[in-house]
């Protein structure tokens, strides 16, 4: 081949490579500077189809359970980082970021803690030490933490929990002060980590999301360290009103990011009603894709919405089955055999459409 022809071939090939549309979520998200992520159980990493899909499609991971108290703390004296470290090693081997979940929650705590009859002072010391040790262990490896998870109830009041008033770490009856206390501890433990408040059912406009907004506004004004809000986004298709979702979630994300914090979608899944043989209706799979599309669009419409994370990625493994006692399922973008569903294609199309497009 002459040099002109080979130069032409080279230029055509490189033009094609540089401008060809991204083929998967990870490539599309990388082009946009967006994080696409999913929750992972480290025991599943040994399954080749699971591991290859995960590494191909996502640029971030989060531990579904491996960094919760009940896994990390088999007893008061022991820290077991085995599973969490396995996930971090996988992420590092594949150039993925790691998000931490979660340091302070009223659930997923070991029995020695919940049944231990500790005083407020003892609980305060236990929690402070836990935050120091866990964030210290993962410093430089976990870039963002859900420091506090699900601390508010549906009326926007602080929920009863071992850390608040059962008996709490010393701020019982003082509203969000315990959240402030632990955010300050977290900032001291790893000053470089991004600190998130993560919540369920506060993604649209309601009393809970108003309370999150008021809390973050107060924290930002007074210099309490907080970098972001995680919106969980566990959606049941039966309750989903798609235009309302799109509008209210966009408005909520916009008001939060206007306070100077990031928003991340942290636990997205859209569960479908299943019949007695465990099957979903075809039209529900297509409405599910519309819900995924609306959520991704709501995130991309705010520059401060930096990550979209699903709670698992294959219908083979999802918490929804046991959580709904088999009544709902098929909530994720890949089916049980790792084939992309309509929901996957909707997410990919929206990410490819980019941040600037307004629908
Ligand atoms: C769930 C996990 O998916 C399950 O494996 C575990 O048994 C219970 O917790 N909100 C959260 C997550 O913040 O940590 C929960 O994860 C789902 C609801």
Image (cartoon, rainbow, N blue to C red):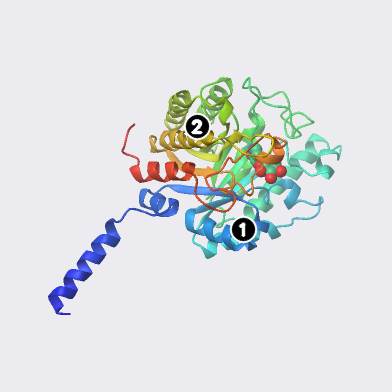
Residue visible at 86% across and 37% down? Answer: 117
Quadrant of the rendered image holding ligand 1 = top right
Quarter of the image for residue 235 reads top right
Residue 259, horizontal then vertical, whole percent? 45, 30
Q: Secondary structure at mark 2?
A: helix
* Vertical position of residue 52 compared to residue 29: above or below: below
Quarter of the image with the C terminus in it: top left
Residue 333, horizontal then vertical, whole percent? 52, 45
Instruction: Point out which mark residue 66 bears.
Output: none
Q: Mark yes or no: residue 104 visible.
A: no
Q: Quick one: which residue is furthest to the bottom in this view?
A: 1
Quarter of the image with the N terminus in it: bottom left
Quarter of the image for residue 296 reads top left
Residue 318, horizontal then vertical, whole percent? 64, 45
Marks 2/1 in contact by CB < 8 Å: the verdict is: no
Separation of marks 2 and 1 at Cα, in angstroms? 32 Å
- Which residue occupies the foreground of this view, 157 or 293? 293
Instruction: Point out which mark residue 87 bears.
Output: 1
* Vertical position of residue 92 compared to residue 210: above or below: below
* Vertical position of residue 194 compared to residue 207: above or below: below
Q: Is mark 1 within 8 Å of ligand 1?
A: no
Q: Which residue is mark 2?
A: 220
Q: Is residue 77 left or right of residue 14?
A: right
Residue visible at 57% across and 60% down? Answer: 49
Crowding near the residue tagged with mark 2, few <14, some 14–19, many ≥20 C-alpha atoms within 10 Å? some
* Vertical position of residue 170 compared to residue 99: above or below: above
Quarter of the image for residue 257 reads top left
């Amino acid at each position: 081949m002459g040099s002109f022809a080979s130069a032409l071939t080279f230029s055509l090939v490189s033009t094609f490579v540089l401008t060809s549309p991204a083929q998967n979520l990870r490539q599309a998200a990388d082009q946009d500077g967006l994080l696409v992520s999913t929750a992972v159980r480290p025991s599943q990493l040994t399954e080749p189809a699971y591991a290859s899909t995960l590494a191909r499609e996502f640029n971030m991971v989060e531990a579904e359970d491996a960094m919760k108290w009940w896994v990390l703390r088999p007893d008061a004296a022991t820290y077991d980082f085995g599973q969490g470290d396995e996930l971090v090693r996988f992420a590092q081997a594949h150039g993925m970021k790691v998000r931490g979940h979660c340091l302070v929650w009223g659930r997923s705590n070991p029995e020695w803690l919940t049944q231990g009859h500790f005083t407020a002072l003892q609980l305060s010391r236990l929690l402070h030490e836990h935050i120091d040790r866990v964030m210290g262990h993962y410093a430089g490896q976990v870039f963002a933490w859900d420091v506090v998870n699900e601390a508010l109830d549906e009326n926007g009041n602080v929920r009863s929990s071992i850390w608040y008033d059962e008996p709490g770490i010393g701020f019982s009856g003082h509203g969000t002060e315990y959240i402030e206390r632990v955010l300050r501890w977290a900032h001291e433990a790893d000053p470089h980590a991004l600190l998130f408040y993560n919540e369920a059912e506060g993604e649209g406009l309601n009393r809970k999301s108003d309370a999150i907004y008021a809390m973050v506004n107060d924290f930002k004004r007074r210099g309490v360290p907080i970098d972001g809000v995680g919106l969980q986004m566990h959606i049941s298709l039966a309750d989903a009103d798609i235009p309302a979702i799109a509008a209210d979630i966009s408005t909520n994300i916009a008001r939060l990011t206007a306070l100077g914090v990031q928003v991340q979608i942290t636990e997205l899944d859209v569960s479908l009603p299943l019949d007695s043989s465990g099957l979903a209706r075809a039209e529900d799979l297509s409405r599910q894709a519309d819900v995924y599309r609306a959520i991704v669009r709501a995130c991309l419409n705010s520059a401060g919405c930096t990550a979209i994370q699903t709670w698992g990625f294959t219908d083979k493994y999802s918490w929804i089955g046991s959580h709904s006692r088999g009544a709902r399922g098929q909530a994720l973008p890949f089916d049980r055999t790792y084939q992309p569903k309509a929901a996957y294609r909707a997410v990919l199309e929206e990410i490819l459409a980019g941040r600037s497009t307004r629908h």
